């Protein structure tokens, strides 16, 4: 136990010591994706926005889904946005993290380079877009409803534990993908079906009673409920979800880094 605590202390020391390098890697990764394009990094916002607008158009205007959830302060588009934005960025972080080690074989083989920074960089790159989109949701709510929720004070806490969970998942996926290259395709398949097995487009009450258990077994549901509390309900409508999400974020971070630490010594032999 003492050894594990020492290992995690070393991780945080490494992050603090290399904070400038992490920022530079993140900034470069974010901007290099759009080098040579006319709109540049604006595409980082346009692409997820188009995806979000399509879902809002289909479910709110074509199918005219009318969700009247007791305690909800805003309209159905806000309900969708509250769950869809963190899910899209979680998927992007997972997709980038899963190849963060395998696509940087030369860096991994350099003894001097701290390879634990690679999954962290991938997560932070994805997180930038989420911050921008969440800011746009807040602006939409303020302009349409003239409301500034007191729950917005909880956003930093929510972001902190979300980052912790995303980094933990990044460590886990990046390490496993070195030895199991199918992981990338598994994440791609999961990204297509994941949105339909979480309460993003529908209410838990709409799910048949005997199937609701799958919502609660899905760890990502708790992330969605926390974001919905902040942006849709404006209150702690799901207090149990916050407890599970906070504890789960810490657990997945510790587990992910533990597995990454155990396997990292074999990376060079496989890549």
Image: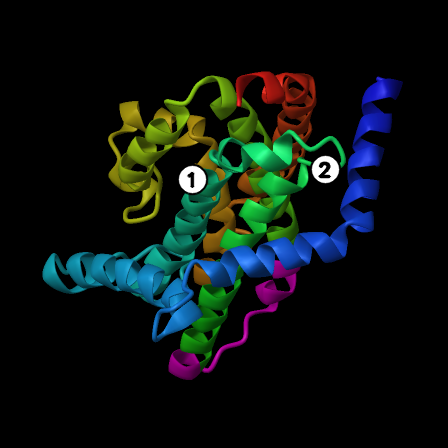
Q: Which residue is mark 2?
A: 114
Viewer-proximal residue, 147 or 175? 175
> From the viewer's perspective, is residue 118 above or below residue 35?
above
> From the viewer's perspective, is residue 129 above or below residue 93?
below
> From the viewer's perspective, is residue 263 above or below residue 199?
above
- Count of marks, rendered view: 2
Task: Label 2, secondary structure: give it.
Answer: loop
Q: Name the spot of residue 2 as percent of width and height, x first.
A: 88, 20
> What residue span does the magenta drawing correspond to?
143-156
Query: What residue appears at the point 50 percent right and 59 percent down from the top-left corner?
Result: 30
Viewer-proximal residue, 50 or 135? 50
Query: What residue appears at the point 50 percent right and 43 percent down from the top-left corner?
Result: 223
Q: Is residue 26 magenta?
A: no
Q: Name the spot of residue 164 as percent of width and height, x first.
A: 64, 42
Q: Is residue 234 visible to us here?
A: no
Q: Which residue is mark 1?
A: 95
Q: Is residue 144 magenta?
A: yes
Quadrant of the frame with the N terminus:
top right
Give the side of residue 206 with respect to residue 251, left or right: left
Query: What residue appears at the point 34 percent right and 67 percent down from the top-left corner?
Result: 46
Hey, which quadrant is residue 49 in on the image?
A: bottom left
For the residues marked 2 and 1, what is the alpha-carbon distance in whole angstroms? 21 Å
Give the side of residue 7 with respect to residue 73, left or right: right
Q: Name the spot of residue 93 as percent of width and height, x first.
A: 48, 44
Q: Is residue 92 visible to us here?
A: yes
Give the side of residue 165 with respect to residue 35, left or right: right
Give the side of residue 108 with respect to residue 85, left or right: right
Looking at the rendered structure, which numbered label has been put on residue 85?
A: none
């Amino acid at each position: 136990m003492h050894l594990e605590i020492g290992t995690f202390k070393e991780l945080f020391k490494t992050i603090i010591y290399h904070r400038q390098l992490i920022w530079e890697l993140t900034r470069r990764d974010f901007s290099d994706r759009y080098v040579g394009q006319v709109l540049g990094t604006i595409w980082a916002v346009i692409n997820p926005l188009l995806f979000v607008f399509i879902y809002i158009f289909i479910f709110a205007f074509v199918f005219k889904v009318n969700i009247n959830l007791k305690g909800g302060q805003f309209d159905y588009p806000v309900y969708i946005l509250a769950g869809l934005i963190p899910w899209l960025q979680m998927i992007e972080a997972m997709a980038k993290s899963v190849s963060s080690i395998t696509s940087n074989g030369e860096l991994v083989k350099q003894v001097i380079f701290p390879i634990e920074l690679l999954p962290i960089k991938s997560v932070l790159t994805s997180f930038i877009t989420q911050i921008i989109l969440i800011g746009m949701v807040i602006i939409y709510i303020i302009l349409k409803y003239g409301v500034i929720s007191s729950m917005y004070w909880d956003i930093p806490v929510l972001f902190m534990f979300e980052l912790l969970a995303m980094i933990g998942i990044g460590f886990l996926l990046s390490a496993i993908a070195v030895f199991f290259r199918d992981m990338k395709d598994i994440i791609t398949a999961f990204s297509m079906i994941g949105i339909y097995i979480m309460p993003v487009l529908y209410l838990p009450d709409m799910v048949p009673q005997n199937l609701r258990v799958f919502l609660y077994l899905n760890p990502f549901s708790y992330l969605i409920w926390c974001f919905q509390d902040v942006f849709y309900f404006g209150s702690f409508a799901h207090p149990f979800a916050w407890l599970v999400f906070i504890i789960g974020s810490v657990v997945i971070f510790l587990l992910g880094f533990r597995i990454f630490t155990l396997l990292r010594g074999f990376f060079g032999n496989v890549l």
